[in-house]
Amino acid sequence: MNGWRDVLRVYGDRRVLAVLLLGFASGLPLLLTFSTLSAWLATESISRASIGLFALVGTPYAFKFLWSPLLDRLPPPLPLGRRRGWGVTIQLLLIAAVLTLGDMDPKANLGLMAGLAVAVAFLSASQDIVIDAYRVEILTDDQQGPGAAMVQAGYRLAMLTAGAGALVIAQAYGWFAAYATMAALLALGTLVFLFGPEPSRRASAATLERERHAEQFLQRRPHLHGAKAHLLAWLYAAVACPFADFITRRSWLAILVFVITYKLGEAMAGVMATPLYVSVGFSLDEIAAVSKVFGFFTTVAGVLIGGVVVNRLGVMRALLLCGILQSLGNLFYVLQAIAGHHIEYLALCVAAENLTGGMAATALVAYISGLCNVAYTATQYALLSSLTAIGRTVFASGGGALAERLGWERFFLMTTVVTVPALLLLLWMMTRRPQPAAAKQDG
């Protein structure tokens, strides 16, 4: 019992609680350029074709790894340290962009509004790069699991706030009031960066030696000298070194395959969950109450439980346990398909899927955090987190066609076993020499 109390006490640590606020700041802008913005445009009688095109404003989230090396290496405009300086700078710009977006008239300035929405998405993706790097670097090894849980809990709470909360405010006071409220709430993240500690760049001798050798090599080239050589050396250290460092890891290719496929089954099932509920006769009100409201609380419970499991079992064993439970959770969709229109089965299905999915998500975030070399945290985490989206989008996109071909029961049985290769790959990696923890790994 004392051991479990110690684990739960980690959630009360000041730095772990700060991560909750950063997760909230990270999740808040997403819906302001997605479903909440779509609702605003719809109330202004903007054409459905134009509203559909606004989905493209989320593109920066998928490509944030491209400019993450700049945030890893460039000095920030504000002299608050590398992470805090960029964090405060980006959030101040983001607050201003959200306020300006909320003051737009869709009918008069739709094109300008689209440009501002892209700017908000770009700044939000950039904020995510800094927040993820800051979280990994300020937490100790035994706080990575609870920290991964807290950042996701804050993210989910922010999506509820920017979704349902913004719509309620807009209904009562107008869209500018809704967006201004969201901009004010973003200041919570700014306060964390202003009053939080600045993590040090704990570059090992091996890392510094690798970068110094690169500059010396370039300086010796007859056609490269002076500022040109320094620029190329800087680009090498900022862009090439993080990727070169990663592929020196043991089983690095297996790690990439695992990261992409670990949540594939859950993603395929999640895409077809609502169509299943509709097909067996649930009304939209029933789906909203159980899947969205009740589902929100079960997801938060899942990510917090996942943090405890990671802390108690370690990352690798937690990945295995949570991965197995995540796969078994998809069996409840089979039960739902067989049972039909029974609200208690819907509640059971939603609870099982969200609890196990939240646990697995926390374990995966903790694992990715532990893979990052603290000299290149922003770049490596941005790359690995982008890879996790491949399973959720590209590979899961064929779920509808498979469901039509196989039928509901066989489709969800298939999603239960599709993650087995990832779990077998995990078992194989567990027999290899374990990767060092994030806080200790460099060079």
Image (cartoon, rainbow, N blue to C red):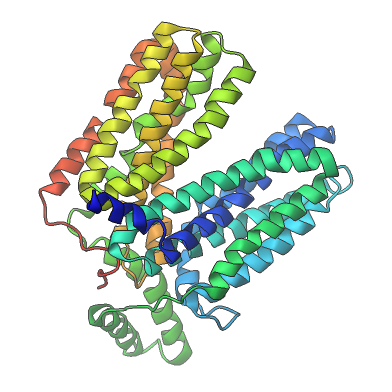
Residue in the picture at 31% in, 79% down: 203
Quadrant of the rendered structure where residue 165 is? Answer: top right
Q: Name the residue: 30% across, 52% down.
A: 5
Image coordinates for residue 228, horizontal then vertical, percent: 46, 85
Asked if residue 209 is positioned above or below residue 320 in the image, the reply reads below
x, y percent for residue 408: 41, 12
Which of the pair 194/402 is nearer the observer?
A: 194
User: Which part of the image, by quadrant, shows the C terminus?
Assistant: bottom left
Q: In this view, does 280 lie above or below 188?
A: above
Q: Which residue lies furthest to the front in this view?
A: 1
Q: Left or right: where does residue 383 sit relative to residue 62?
A: left
Q: From the viewer's perspective, is 237 left or right of 54?
A: left
Q: Please report the residue visible at 42 percent of the width from the left and 21 percent of the height from the top.
A: 349
Residue 106 in the image: x percent, y percent? 83, 44
Residue 111 appearing in the image: no
Query: Does 358 sit above or below residue 278?
Result: below
Identify the image quadrant of residue 370: bottom left
